[in-house]
Amino acid sequence: MALTDMEMERLTDLAEKKQFRKLKEILCDMNEVDIAEVLAELSTEQALVTFRLLPKDLATEVFSSMEVEEQQDIITSMDDRELHQIIEDLAIDDAVDLVEELPATVVKRILKNAASGTRQLINQYLQYPENSAGSIMTAEYVALRPAMTVEEAFYYIRKNGVDKETIYTCYVINPQRKLEGVVTLKDLLMSAYETRVEDIMDDNVMSALTTDDQEEVAATFRKYDLLALPVVDKEKRLVGIVTVDDIVDVMEEEATEDFQKMAAMSPSEKSYLKTSVFTLAKNRIVWLLVLMISSTISGLILSNYEKAFASVPMLVSFIPSIMNTGGNSGSQASTLIIRGMATGEIELKDVIKAIWKEIRVGLICGTILAIVNFGRLYFMYPDSLMISVVVVTSMFLAVVLGKVLGVILPMAAKALKLDPALMAAPLLTTILDSLSMVIYFSLATWLLSVG
């Protein structure tokens, strides 16, 4: 359960009054994530004192749960011996994340104080492509041999499993470290001691390549409800595993990135409150400029129909309604398509099926909107029947077109190896605005004989 405001206030009050012994007693009974939240609320000096009071094992877990800026403060305050201890106790994937985020001067000190084996592993992980399975995996897994008996497997797990990410799922490898199967702790518990691991392992094991995109790995976790997934190289040698806690972080990062792209912003890895004003402006201004320039197309279209405005000034008043309805229609479709592709529910081969479905949805929604709008316009402007026909027909076509483009544009982006989120509301709406105006004034010119 998360800390309440009252509990947080009590703990920070103990730190301010320098009652660190009492504070330590309370913190030692808390979850490491909650402790990290408490330290974040303290001043730098108070947080450093409190962190040093924590037991070694707990301190390592708390450290891995801290934000990068807070980790940097802790590292700066440590001597080389303490830093060595922290780095060696951290899971290798957490150590790699730390090295990727911190400034070069701090990273240099970390690598200098890491054991040679740890330093070699960190450097190896840093060579994998960004956002790949290799970049998020950990080397802390239990590997068994096929010829082991269940009794030998239990002995090995007790001896080596204490620092592993998971011991529930164990991986079976041959002398060349090639992945041959997987066996769970339940399988071992339910088997006789003399049973050989190869007789109870599942040799139909799923795995990911080190170069696989982390989104593909996340999709595999979602589809098969996995707790861990082995990662192999091109020779099928086991090099690490990805665990569900890492995938939850990936899903959060990818969702945040998609939201930012759908809002026409460049993605940022930092949280909103810790991102500078200049960085926020830089992430937004490029897309704002692109959308501003692209919106001039709508202006050029309108300028071509000046005679229509002069003949029937009332036409201008319906422009916002038609543009907004078409844009909203496209946003609804694109949101569902982008989400469906992100979860793996919709694939490129489904494009015709999706278009046909959205056409039918567009016909239903467009018809209802047209009927309601025609009744409103006829009531308000009983002497302008043909104008009402032009408006409701344009709206109907804009809705259907919006639904279709809401499918085609994200899927086209996917086919071109671009992020489908780029084709979300702002860009899609800008495109639909222009097309809606072409439809509207083309119909007005034809049916009203103006322009």
Image (cartoon, helix red, strand yellow):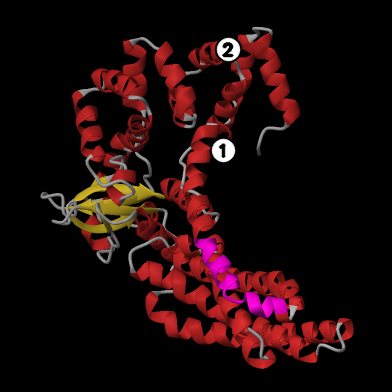
Residue at coordinates 31% horizontally, 51% vertically from top-left?
133
Was residue 300 drawn as part of the magenta stretch in this picture?
yes
Residue 193 in sight from this viewpoint? no
Q: Which residue is mark 2?
A: 46
Q: Looking at the picture, how far across and down is residue 412, in whole percent?
A: 39, 72
Q: What quarter of the picture does the N terminus occupy?
A: top right
Q: What's drawn in magenta, residue-wise? A: 294-310
Q: Looking at the picture, how far across and down is residue 248, in whole percent?
A: 47, 49
Determine crowd level at label 1: few under 14, some 14-19, many 20+ residues with C-alpha closer than 10 A.
Answer: few
Classify residue 99 as left or right of residue 396: left
Which residue ends up furthest to the left in the rendered image? 176
Q: Looking at the picture, how far across and down is residue 313, in whole percent?
A: 75, 76
Q: Nearer the viewer, residue 118 or 26?
A: 118
Residue 226 vertical position relative to residue 270 in the rendered view, above or below: below
Q: What quarter of the picture does the C terminus occupy?
A: bottom right
Q: Quadrant of residue 217?
A: bottom left
Nearer-N-terminus badge (2/1)? 2
Residue 96 in sight from this viewpoint? yes
Q: Nearer the viewer, residue 269 or 410?
A: 410
> Please, what is the dominant secondary structure of the magenta stretch?
helix
Amino acid beneath label 2: Gln
Q: Which residue is mark 1?
A: 272
Amino acid beneath label 1: Tyr
Residue 42 vertical position relative to residue 66 in the rendered view, above or below: above
Q: Looking at the picture, how far across and down is residue 184, in whole percent?
A: 35, 55
